[in-house]
Image (spheres, rainbow, N blue to C red):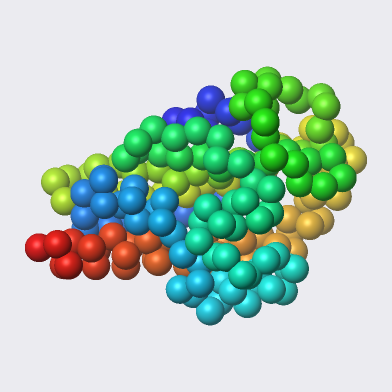
Amino acid sequence: MLLDKYLPKYTFNEYHQVKINCSKEQAYKAARKLDFSKSGTIRLLFKMRGLPTDDLTLMGFINRVNFTLIDEIQNDEFVIGFWANKKIEKILDRGRFAIDNKSKRLKVIWNFKINEIDHGLVLLSTETRIYCITMMTKIFFSIYWAMIRPFSGLIRIKMLNIIKECAEHSIIKTA
């Protein structure tokens, strides 16, 4: 897994999955074209956290909040992340991101992974990993995580359901 390549050691994580009746290619395409605006709940939670809501495509959101598409294996997995000292910073060197555990306070990475279960049935998962580099960051982040984790999990469940609906609907449209 690409997650293990870039952040094998982490302090906190969150994992969710959904089964989808489609091919790996359709699930991957639907995940890459994720549009958060299809969920009023996600829009509301983004607004409450002060996140931008004007371009809610996955790539638009990534660019607006300084996340980085770190790596991808076509039709299998892609990984998004950022690191931070006082603010979120884009990852300019993914090799450095993978090994540098000193120059920043926090590293965050999340993926979308597609595994084929059977012909026409896939398991789409998303995992978020957070690595707190200093003890002080771990203390402060654990308080923050306790407050936002339920909402973060809800967002991820809604994302997976949007992807599932889009991927399964594309089968119907192309059949």
Residue displayed at 41% across by 56% down: 33
Residue displayed at 68% across by 22% down: 96
Q: Nearer the viewer, residue 123 or 111?
A: 111
Above or below, 159 relative to 48: above
How far across and how far down the image is residue 87, in percent? Answer: 82, 47
- Residue 116 appears anywhere in the view: yes
Q: Nearer the viewer, residue 156 or 34?
A: 34
How far across and how far down the image is residue 12, in percent? Answer: 67, 44
Q: Nearer the viewer, residue 169 or 4?
A: 169
Residue displayed at 86% across by 50% down: 140
Above or below, 47 relative to 152: below
How far across and how far down the image is residue 75, in percent? Answer: 32, 40
- Left or right, 58 with reference to 100: left
Toward which corner of the image does residue 97 lie, by quadrant? top right
Residue displayed at 44% across by 30% down: 1
Q: Nearer the viewer, residue 105 or 59?
A: 59
Q: Residue furthest left?
A: 175
- Left or right, 17 with reference to 121: right
- Residue 98 appears anywhere in the view: no
Above or below, 2 relative to 137: above
Toward which corner of the image does residue 154 lie, by quadrant? bottom right
- Left or right, 168 with reference to 147: left
Toward which corner of the image does residue 13 lie, by quadrant? top right
Quarter of the image where the C terminus is located: bottom left
How far across and how far down the image is residue 42, in percent? Answer: 56, 71
